[in-house]
Amino acid sequence: MPEIVSEEQQRRLSRNIMIAAAVAILFFIFAAIVTVRTFSGVDRYEAALGEIRDVTLDDGSIVHLNSDSEVEVRFTGHGRKVRIVKGEASFDVAPDSERPFDVEVRSALIRAVGTAFNVRMRPALTELTVTHGTVTVHCGNKAQQRVTAGNGAVIQPRTIVLTRLGDRLVSQRIAWRHQMLELDGETIEQATAEFNRYRKAPILIGDTRVSPLRIGGRFRVHDSRAFLSALERTLLVRTVRGEDGSVMLLYRDEESTQASESDRS
C-alpha cells in the first residue's frame, strides 16, 4: 500500500528541494568564476568617474588609478604585465630583477624593474612621466628608448619623442595622486578639461573669448567651486549655473555685467 504523504511533509520536501537547487546553482557560479580566474589569470581594476583609487598588487607594487581609468593585470612566474585599458595610471614598481614589469598602452610597451612612473592616455597620444629610476619604451619598429627620472616621452603609434620635464612639471603631472590640480598658466579651456575629469556635470565654455584666458593656482580636484570663484575674482569671467549642475563660463564685459545686475534686481 503506497505511503500517504501529508501536506506539511510535501511542503517541507519542496522547500528542501528548492534549497538544494539554490545551493547547487551558487556552487556552479562560484566554480565558473574560479575557473575563469584560474585560466585567464587576469585581474581588472578600475576607478569610477570622480574616484582616485590605489591598488596594491600581489608583488607589492602599487597602481594609482585616476578618475575613470581601468587596467588589467596578469602576473606569471616569468613576468608582470599590466595593460592600461583607459584613462591614467601611476605605478610604484616593486623591484624584481627576474620578473620585469611591463605596461602595455595602445601600441607601446613600457618596461621597468624597480621604478615609478605615470602614464596618461590622451585622445591622440600617450604621455609618459618618469618620477624615479629608469624605464624603457618600445613602440612598433622603432628602436627602444630609455627614459630616466625627471623626463618623459610622448608616444604615438610609430613615434617616440623624449621630453625634458624638470621637477616642477613632474610634480604638476602627478599632483592628482594627492587629489590636487596644479595650474601654472594653463588656459581656461585646458583647466576646465582637467576639472571635468572629476565632474558628472561639466564646466562649459559659452564664449570663445574665455578659452584663451590663463590661470594659475593649486586646487583640490573635487573643489571646482574654488576654481570658479578664482576665475570670477581674477579674470573677466562670469559663471551661470544650470539646473543639472553644469556651469557655463561667459565673458564678463560691461554689457553682460549690467544685464546680470538687472536680472538680480
Image (spheres, rainbow, N blue to C red):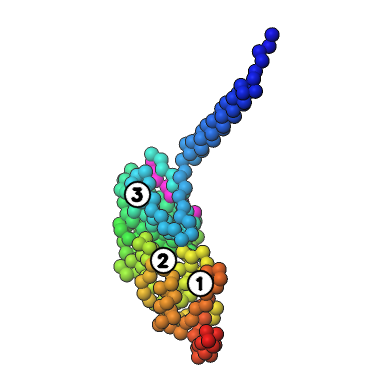
Task: Work out how far the residue at label 2 is from the one at label 3, CA to CA, in angstroms.
Answer: 25 Å
Residue that numbered label 2 is attached to:
221
Residue that numbered label 3 is attached to:
61
* Residue at the image position 38 percent from the left and 41 percent from the top: 78
Amino acid type assigned to the residue bearing label 1 in the image: Ile
Rendering coords of residue 129 (x, y %): 37, 62
Whether tag 2 and tag 3 are in contact, CB under 8 A, the answer is: no
Of badges 1 and 3, the one in the foreground is 1
On the question of residue 237 being in view, the answer is: yes
On the question of residue 105 being in view, the answer is: no
Of badges 2 and 3, the one in the foreground is 2
Whether tag 2 and tag 1 are in contact, CB under 8 A, the answer is: no
Rendering coords of residue 28 (x, y %): 54, 32
Q: Please identify the quadrant where the N terminus is shown.
A: top right
Rendering coords of residue 53 (x, y %): 41, 55
The region drawn magenta spans 78-85
Q: Does the magenta stretch include residue 131?
A: no
In the image, 141 versus 63, the foreground residue is 63
Task: Classify mark 2: residues with Cα within 10 Å, few (<14), some (14-19) or many (20+).
Answer: many
Q: Earlier in the sequence, mark 1 or mark 3?
A: 3
Residue that numbered label 1 is attached to:
203
